[in-house]
Image (tube, grey):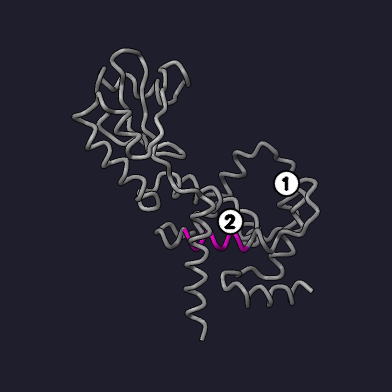
Amino acid sequence: MIQNLLVFMCLINPLFAATPSDISLRNKIMPYLFPGETRLLGAAQLENAELYARILEKYGMGVTDVALLKEQQRIEQNTKLPENLRRIKAAFQGDDGAFRRVYVLPVYVERVIYFDLFRNSETIHRESLDKAQRFLKRVKNHASRFEMLAKKEGAAVARVSDKEVPGGWGSLLMPQVRSGKVFPLVVSTEENWGVAFRSSAKKELRVALFRKRNFDEWVNEERAIIGNQNKAQIP
C-alpha cells in the first residue's frame, strides 16, 4: 500500500524523494512529535522537508552531511524533552543515517529556511526593500514631512516609545537617532523593513513599515517553480 502511494506521489510530484522505509519511520515517530495526531503525515512532512532542502540549495545554502550532523548535536545538547528524544532515536534502532534523514533534516530545514534565509533576505524581499530605500532617500532631507511621505508610499507608521519593548525598536534605535532626524539605514524586523524618525516633540520614534513577503506564499511560489523545472526534465 505504501509503495503504491509512493509511486503515485512520484508521478504527480517529482520533488518527492523519500523511500517507503523513510515514510514508515516518520509515521512511527509521529506520536512523539505531535501527541494526539492520528493521521499518517509522514509522506507529506518528508516531501515538505525535501522541498525546503531544494529551495535552500537554490539560494546557495544546500544541506550537507556536516550540517545535519551539527544539527543532530545541537538537538541533543539543547533538547528540553530528553526522554522524548530517546524514544524517537530508539525507533531508528541505531540507524544514524535514517535518524538524520527522517528526523533531523525536517527540523534543520524548517529552522534554517525561515530564520537564516527568508526572514532577512534582501533578494526575497527585494520589492519592499527597494520601496523602503527609496523612501529613506527621499525623506532624509524632509523629516518634518515623514508621516505624509510615508502614507504616500503606502507604508504604515508605527509610534514606538523607548520604554515600550525592552530590546525592541525604541530601546535599540532611540540612542542612535538625533531628535528631529531620520535614522540613516533601513532596519529589518521579522515582518517589515523599517525607516525610523525621531520626533523632536516627544521621546518616541515614528517608524514607516514596508511589509515583507508572506512566507507561505513565497514557499508556494518556489514549489511551483521547482515543480515546473522537474517536469521539464522528464523525457
Asked if the residue at tag 1 contacts the one at tag 2, i.e. Cβ–Cβ closer than 8 Å, the answer is no
Based on the picture, tell me whether residue 48 belongs to the magenta stretch.
yes
Residue 116 appears left or right of 109: left
Q: Amino acid at mark 2?
A: Leu
Residue 97 appears left or right of 169: right
Q: Which residue appears farthest toward the bottom when viewing the image?
A: 235
Q: Position of residue 76 (x, y in %)?
A: 62, 44
Q: Position of residue 34 (x, y in %)?
A: 73, 47
Residue occupying image coordinates x 31% and y 36%:
186
Q: Amino acid at mark 1?
A: Arg
Residue at disc 1, secondary structure? helix
Q: Position of residue 161 (x, y in %)?
A: 42, 18
Q: CA distance from mark 2 to mark 1?
A: 17 Å
What main secondary structure does the magenta stretch of the protein show?
A: helix
Based on the picture, tell me whether residue 167 belongs to the magenta stretch.
no
| As drawn, 91 above or below 164 | below
**Magenta region:** 47-55
Within 10 Å of disc 1 (Cα), the crowding (few <14, some 14-19, many 20+) is few
Name the residue carrying label 1.
86
Q: The N terminus is located in which quarter?
A: bottom right
